[in-house]
Every structure is written in structure tokens, then in C-alpha cells.
Image (tube, rainbow, N blue to C red):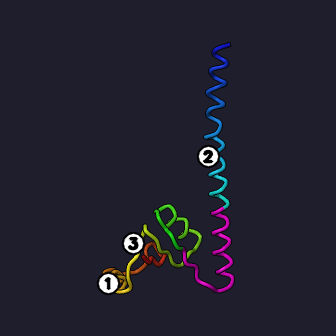
Amino acid sequence: MNVFTDYYNRTVAYLPSVVTAIILIVVALIVAAIVRSVVDLARGLGMSVVAEGVEDERTWIALREVGCDVAQGWWLARALPADELVAWLAERDATTRDGLLALP
């Protein structure tokens, strides 16, 4: 009986992390679907799409894949005053990164 009880207790203790992981995956899929829908809507209306708050490469790649036009955020560069922004842009041969306009 102790073996069963021990196994049961460890399994039950593990369940919250599994449920949390499933919830996080579902939320990520919902967010991805919403972003894709917003980009499609903007395209249908003839508008450009600007993504703010790009903080990692994974987000950058996902935005590029759904067709976002412009992105800004800490992964690209820290926030800059206008005069520094001009210098930041001038230092680069192109203001795009893998086909997506990158702004700090």
C-alpha cells in the first residue's frame, strides 16, 4: 500500500505543473491567433502593422512570419531620444532586419 500511496502522492503533486503548462500553451495559441487576425485585418484595410514591445527573437520571428511591417522594442534597441535615433538609423546600411523594419 505504501508504494501505491507514494506513487499517487507524487502524481497528484505533478498535476498542477502539467495543468499550468497546458494553460500556457492554450493562451499562447490564442494570442498567436489574435495577432494573426489583427495583421490580416490591417492588410485587408490597406494598413501597415506596427508591433511594439518586441523583447526576444522568438517574438521577432513570429511577427515576421505573420507579416508585420514594423517592430520596436528592447530586443531591437533601447528607447532613444530623437537625436540619438537619427544617429542609430544612420549607423545601419538598412533599417530592416529579415524584411521587417526595426525601430528602437
Return the residue at label 2.
21
* Residue range corresponding to the magenta coloring: 31-51
- Judged by depth in the image, the label closer to the viewer, 3 or 2, is 3
Q: Mark 1 or mark 3: name the one nearer the start of the chain.
A: 3
As helix, strand or loop, the secondary structure at mark 2 comes to helix
Type of amino acid at the residue the image marks with label 3: Arg
As helix, strand or loop, the secondary structure at mark 1 comes to helix
Residue 21 placement (x, y as % from top left) = 61, 46
Q: Hey, which quadrant is residue 86 in on the image?
A: bottom left
Residue 16 placement (x, y as % from top left) = 64, 39
Q: Is residue 74 left or right of residue 18?
A: left
As helix, strand or loop, the secondary structure at mark 3 comes to loop
Using the numbered discs, state the Cα–Cα distance from disc 1 to disc 3 in whole angstroms: 14 Å
State whether the magenta stretch is mostly helix, strand or loop. Answer: helix
Q: Is residue 48 left or right of residue 45?
A: left
**Looking at this rendering, what residue extends furthest in the front direction?**
81
Using the numbered discs, state the Cα–Cα distance from disc 1 to disc 2 in whole angstroms: 43 Å
Q: Hey, which quadrant is residue 45 in on the image?
A: bottom right
Could you say which is closer to the camera, residue 79 or residue 43?
79
- Asked if the residue at tag 2 contacts the one at tag 3, i.e. Cβ–Cβ closer than 8 Å, the answer is no
Return the residue at label 1.
87
